[in-house]
Amino acid sequence: MPAPLRVAMIGNGFMGAAHSQGWRTAPRFFDLPAIPEMTVMVGRDPDKNAALAQRWGWAEASQDFDAVIARDDIDVVDIVTPGNLHCDMAIAALEAGKHVLCEKPLANTVEEAKRMDAAATAAAERGVLAMVGFTYRRVPAAAFARDLVARGALGTIRQVRAQYLQDWLSDPEAPLTWRMDKSKAGSGALGDIGAHAIDMAQFITGQTIDSVSGVMETFVKERPTMGEGQGLSGSAGEGRGPVTVDDYAAFNGRFDSGALGTFEATRFATGRKNALRVEVAGDKGSILFDLEDMNAIQYYDATAPATEQGFRRIYVTEADHPYLEAWWPPGHMLGYEHGFSHQVKDLVEALAAGVQPTPSFADGYQVQRVLDAVERSAGDGSAWVSTQA
Amino acid sequence: MPAPLRVAMIGNGFMGAAHSQGWRTAPRFFDLPAIPEMTVMVGRDPDKNAALAQRWGWAEASQDFDAVIARDDIDVVDIVTPGNLHCDMAIAALEAGKHVLCEKPLANTVEEAKRMDAAATAAAERGVLAMVGFTYRRVPAAAFARDLVARGALGTIRQVRAQYLQDWLSDPEAPLTWRMDKSKAGSGALGDIGAHAIDMAQFITGQTIDSVSGVMETFVKERPTMGEGQGLSGSAGEGRGPVTVDDYAAFNGRFDSGALGTFEATRFATGRKNALRVEVAGDKGSILFDLEDMNAIQYYDATAPATEQGFRRIYVTEADHPYLEAWWPPGHMLGYEHGFSHQVKDLVEALAAGVQPTPSFADGYQVQRVLDAVERSAGDGSAWVSTQA
Amino acid sequence: MPAPLRVAMIGNGFMGAAHSQGWRTAPRFFDLPAIPEMTVMVGRDPDKNAALAQRWGWAEASQDFDAVIARDDIDVVDIVTPGNLHCDMAIAALEAGKHVLCEKPLANTVEEAKRMDAAATAAAERGVLAMVGFTYRRVPAAAFARDLVARGALGTIRQVRAQYLQDWLSDPEAPLTWRMDKSKAGSGALGDIGAHAIDMAQFITGQTIDSVSGVMETFVKERPTMGEGQGLSGSAGEGRGPVTVDDYAAFNGRFDSGALGTFEATRFATGRKNALRVEVAGDKGSILFDLEDMNAIQYYDATAPATEQGFRRIYVTEADHPYLEAWWPPGHMLGYEHGFSHQVKDLVEALAAGVQPTPSFADGYQVQRVLDAVERSAGDGSAWVSTQA
Amino acid sequence: MPAPLRVAMIGNGFMGAAHSQGWRTAPRFFDLPAIPEMTVMVGRDPDKNAALAQRWGWAEASQDFDAVIARDDIDVVDIVTPGNLHCDMAIAALEAGKHVLCEKPLANTVEEAKRMDAAATAAAERGVLAMVGFTYRRVPAAAFARDLVARGALGTIRQVRAQYLQDWLSDPEAPLTWRMDKSKAGSGALGDIGAHAIDMAQFITGQTIDSVSGVMETFVKERPTMGEGQGLSGSAGEGRGPVTVDDYAAFNGRFDSGALGTFEATRFATGRKNALRVEVAGDKGSILFDLEDMNAIQYYDATAPATEQGFRRIYVTEADHPYLEAWWPPGHMLGYEHGFSHQVKDLVEALAAGVQPTPSFADGYQVQRVLDAVERSAGDGSAWVSTQA
């Protein structure tokens, strides 16, 4: 009989819904060594938090983070708050002896990320483990792409193209939200979605970005402010306010192997909704992952006879593909939130085995250093900046 | 405070897992007028059934169908057994005053379906309602396709192409399972997947198939039998046994509007895993739905300027698309099992409002008449056969 | 020094432009054993014919078919007139000792085709050779598809799906042209484009269609007549006239191997401009050819490891692909008219070697028997009709 | 009766074959105000040149460039030699009073390009005109993309992604050719294919790249030398030699409007054969051109209702699309060499009208300045470099 694993989730926004679905669903499909219990959800607004906790299946609701992390009946703290709160919360939870799952990006600044990494290292010595939530690693097609690379199917990797393309700001009248406010969001397209492109490129290649040369831009400098109490879908208010983060970031990066990569993160790619694309080319083959076609991977085998080479679209839905044995027959699609179930599975298995889950806070810190290096490069006329700590 | 809606599910195979996910998940994302309670799951093998009931979140497990439908604390009976059991179970449940959700195809024979339709009609007079589970209607892209047709975007519809292409039998050494046994499965590709192609074509067009001319074929007449106790993925046993159902069915159909359709259901379309495709062409436009690309619809607007016409690939992930408001931001994909949550939503809403859910048993009976007409046509040299009752 | 091969072309419509491009271009790219000379073009209207002959590069223009085929300085007669003239012209040319290239379909009726086949057989005994112009066989991707099948890459073929989809009649106000007049065109979608689907399916599989069951339809029975002197692009005249051919034909066919095929030819597939598609599925793999993506072939290798199977899109532009060595580097596209150059190459090589070019009049006659069988089946309630002579 | 336009072509490599096809074919399909005569082809090797002149349809062959440009019976000099010869030849021809068509890139250095531009400006005052051969502008889909942008369909353009991806060097054992020798080729991927990406991005947007920040790389520093007398397809010789040009170039560019662009030119994009892709995003829409799908354009209309937005794939084969009226019915594909016929058409029309053909030498010089700025930026740690003269 598997032991329970008691979870407190901090935050109740869009990511809270996704994480809740992961905690709720993973044990229904996977044989886990411990069974997650959705013990308590923490949020600031009592009414909203209580209602969502019930909706999403959390046994209790609380407004008191400190009290929650002090409880004996909590094993894991899952942090899905805005980025500016990650650092203090994650360190406090680790110090309270709780395993931590923290949403990406790990922090809003490289200094915070460094402190978090140090706290995670210290906690690990006490058997307390930390993980950062780059969930897209758990899309089966992405995991399979990594497997292909890892077994040498691509040969020597020479170049990478990683993009995260969205378009929700291409309309200059789209209203101002907290995501365009540097004090809360840290950065714009770069940290929000560029972080995914960086992590995915490093994950699939198994390589690290050593240095970068980049540019960032805010195309639309002012936007309509939103009326009181309105959410993301609110209509515009009467005034206008400044956009203090980037709309767009593009950079060239050098991997530790010597491979080169082009990276692009934008909220102005009209028509592209959620296009996290990573193409990796080696001397024996190449692969293309695209989150807008997330159940498939494109694979080109350059060792096939010349007349038979072509990008093949593999539906990553076979029982032998990563995570798939738990789900449906071949050809039945998975969606966005399945990655959160896979994240729960991997985290629970790591915790039960007492091994470091991945991606670790060190991995998150490394991504943060790349983000920071891009910002510094962009501020210094695109001069090359090292990502070394 | 919404009332509870207490559910008994009969059957615990692959479809049971999918239905359970629907019952469990729908109230987490949709505001339902009644909250489903997963009261009891019924299955023959006590140990397997108890284990799966716990896994999937059912409060109780039972082996006694009759006792379960006699209980006062059951409102809905959800039947996910093989097709040969549908008729007796559905009628018994309706007569016991329970609402019924019955998996497709409604029955294994047209006579059974006719009796079920009559029972549903009688039950409806007592406020007891029945629905058949053509879940693919609830894929947002399919529902949106129907909306486009319904508002006249395609003009006068002239032709339809509906296919359900799979390939799991194209290997002649794939082993014999109950799905190739006529006594259990009723028919092969025709009833299993052709039924979906028929329902989807009628659903999207809003039209009815009046008559058909078809052909059926069993390409591989004998297959290796499976060893004892093996599931779908079991390796072959030592003997060989006869395939008593069709591998392939193709037919031409005439709709009540005069439009013509080509239909194909096959388990031999090598490389096609789950390709339910429906293309509908009218004088003002056309649409193509493909279940292997289930988050999108292809739409061609023939009223645009000639130089600007083209099939546009619409990601059906906007908040205003069917069912999408409950889920994720634009560009975030849904998967196979979301249709089961949507089915629960639609059923619960219809039951709460006391209106007939769709598709009804009458709709299921109509599909069954098409299946039957195809079989009769195939047995009569492809002569045209009416689908009228 | 290669000998000249002196050509007379009969007809000066759209096909005349395409054939002229073939005759003119083939010797510029291929090393031919004889060099085509564009000696004379025959047409009815003297002014138009003279102007087009000069435009297209023919040395002379003539209105006198009989005189031209009697000339000593003509080696090949290339017939690109409407189908109702093929039979008499081809037989006369063969009897005059000229090699003949005749556009498809070979004739408007099966009786004509039979006579032409007999004439070709008789001529062949005198060393006079005949070929029918199913040019799409010469699209490199189609030729490569056939090669894949021929070397067994697909294993045992079970099913075929062949479609030729166009949409130029889906507008019910599209005007009446000679192609909708049975006395000139013979049939509508069936003979015009269905003939290509039939030939391509037989060509790629290397198999013959033995029997068929089909349906034909004229969706729009009357259309606006065109004003005087107007061409295909003319605006509608004032009256309306009857459409006397089919808009749409669909049939099931049985190949001599036992494989089954679905076939569809339509001018009402809104949004499909020139979609000649042939998908062939065997137990070891499958291929998809699509004329709207004519520089590529989709190939699925079912013998690859299960996790690595997928349709691969092969650009058929490598030097080792059929016909490609003569053209451009990999990745440089060919277009519609290249097939006509390839046809010239193959014909000239066959004539120089004194061997039968393919497709022969016997092949054309076989396609005509399939067309005829479809018409008879459609007229007999879709009863199965043999294509045997 | 149109006047003749007498052409001398200098060079007889791959580009000579393509240009010859353009000169030969354009007057067969377009109504030109002057009829090109293929008067003389100039090449160094007498036997090879004479043979190819005959093959390609040139009336004479010559080894004497100076004598040819001095002839009275030459109106146009078409230069298709390697880039290091462009400057002297083009200037000499212009000074001899001949119109000049010069292949891209205009020159191997920015200094040469500047001199050529000056010579063209001076010649224009005497009515002698010059054009540079960025032929891909004449792909109908590219020209149509520009038309869409020019009429405002995309609104305010914010970002551009332009790539030219090839893979013929991804195998480290691919042999050394003149294209990897800086003394002959000037640069590698950057000048050869990056020049196309730059020109196409500027052409479609109608904007100019003002400044750039870039990186260049030679992944494989040594390659097998080729044996004597071997062509591009020759097998490797015994030694190894240095690669003195770039394999890869990537840069960020700023347009004069303030829009940003990412640019990539590579011969290491395994699986990409000839992928010149330009995506342009504005606040009202976006377009994607891909040379590997050259008969179509992807267009996204962001002004459509939110539920109906999607990239539409427009086959650019309608009679009203650029250049198409001369060719085949809708849905019939054009290929690589059609651009050369279109180039001839546009050049002949400009010469007949006495107006400047485009792209001019000034346009070619501007592209050259971008190439030069990228090289300087790459040599200066990716510092931003202006492209101003």
Image (cartoon, coloured by chain):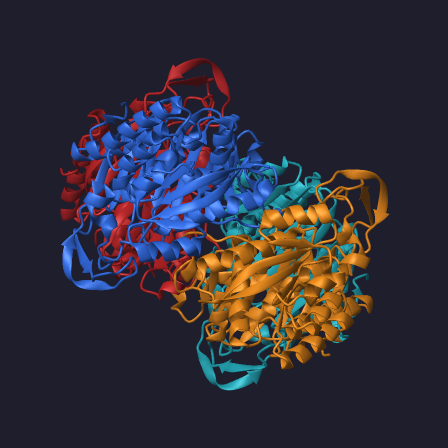
Chain colours: A red, B cyan, C orange, D blue
Percent position (x, y) of residue A104? Answer: 30, 38
Q: Residue at x 72, y 49 (%)?
A: C46
Q: Residue at x 81, y 39 (%)?
A: C237
- From this view, report whether residue D251 is shown above or below residue C302: above
Q: Does residue B148 appear left or right of residue B210 in this picture?
A: left
Could you say which is closer to the camera, residue C53 or residue C175? C53
Could you say which is closer to the camera, residue C174 or residue C347? C347
How many marks the image carries: the answer is: 0
- From this view, report whether residue C21 is shown above or below residue D139: below
- From this view, report whether residue D194 is shown above or below residue B59: above
- From this view, report whether residue A154 is shown above or below residue A289: below
Q: Which part of the image, by quadrant, shows the N terminus of chain C?
A: bottom left
Q: Does residue A171 appear left or right of residue B152 in this picture?
A: left
Percent position (x, y) of residue A255? Answer: 20, 45
Percent position (x, y) of residue B157? Answer: 73, 47
Percent position (x, y) of residue B380? Answer: 77, 75
In this view, which residue lies farthest toward the bottom?
B239
Rendered image quadrant of residue D262: top left
Q: Which part of the image, by quadrant, shows the C terminus of chain C?
A: bottom right
Could you say which is closer to the camera, residue B233 or residue B78? B233
In this view, which residue lies farthest toward the top?
A239
Rendered image quadrant of residue C213: bottom right
Residue B270 visible from this viewpoint: no
Q: Does residue C175 appear left or right of residue A333 in this picture?
A: right
Q: Residue at x 25, y 47 (%)?
A: A202
